[in-house]
Image (cartoon, grey):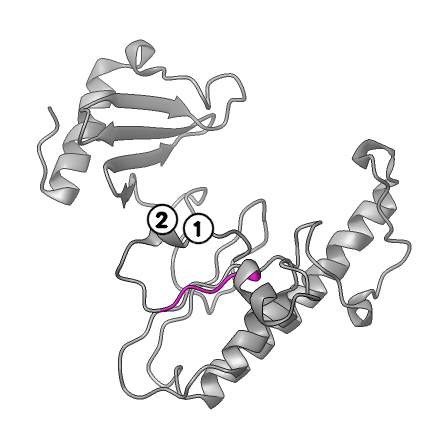
Amino acid sequence: MIWSIQKHYGENVNMYYDGISATTINPEISINDDKKVILDKLNRLADFDGTPAFFYLHFMSTHNVGIMDPAYMVYEPSKLSSFGRSTPLTNLINNFDNRVIQLDNSLKETISILDKKGYLENAIVIFTADLLSIPVPESWDGYSIFEENRPEFIFQHEKKYHSCIWANDTSLYQYVYNKHTHIQELFDMKSEITQYRNIIDQFDKERLQTVKTSLENFYSIKLD
């Protein structure tokens, strides 16, 4: 991770390390360098001692601010202009493909390091990404909210917020409940107009009640 946001993780985190932390060891490196931030830190990690562990790793390789290793500049031309709209499409595609190659290698090294240190003997590894649309490998467990066999609702809980997400052919909705203020909001995430605007008053009341009941049942809570 690149931003100093340790305080947001609370006291139940044994170790927090980001790009800014890495620069205290070597001021010459970039906070957006996956190899010198994430991989170097993992290499210095102690071997697994039997204590259950959880790792969350955020890679920057596929972001334009991520530092690229010339070894992974496979496709050319890939140089981006200072103004994105003036960059040729070929360059944009090649740049992203190069970054994906670098990310793939970083993930391979990550798995290798954790395996050698004993952390993967009995482990679950989860990869997440946004803005990505590829066929799901048959060997993967899980589901996409865009698949026909998806569950009707997907639930999320973060601190004071409980939310429920569901989709239909034209929209992707998210209902959000604040347990502290009891404020309820509903957003259509597929619309640039409504994704930041609460549309709960315009939504079908009967359907909304079904959503709220499902959320209550899932988390065993009572919405006010």
Quadrant (top left/top right/bottom left/bottom right) for the C terminus: top left
Q: Residue at x 29, y 30 (%)?
A: 176
Instruction: Examine the image and state in which quarter residue 48 appears.
Output: bottom left
Main secondary-structure element of the magenta-colored stretch: loop
33 and 173: which is toward the camera: 33
Residue 99 vs residue 47: left or right?
Answer: right
Amino acid at pointer 2:
His
Identify residue for label 1. Answer: 5
Q: Are marks 1 and 2 in contact (CB under 8 Å)?
A: yes
Asked which secondary structure carries label 1, the reply is loop
Q: Position of residue 44 (x, y in %)?
A: 51, 82
Amino acid at pointer 1:
Ile
Q: Position of residue 66 (x, y in %)?
A: 68, 56
Identify residue for label 2. Answer: 8
Q: How many marks?
A: 2
Asked which secondary structure carries label 2, the reply is helix
Q: What stretch of residues is rendered in magenta?
A: 15-19
Residue furthest to the right in view is: 77
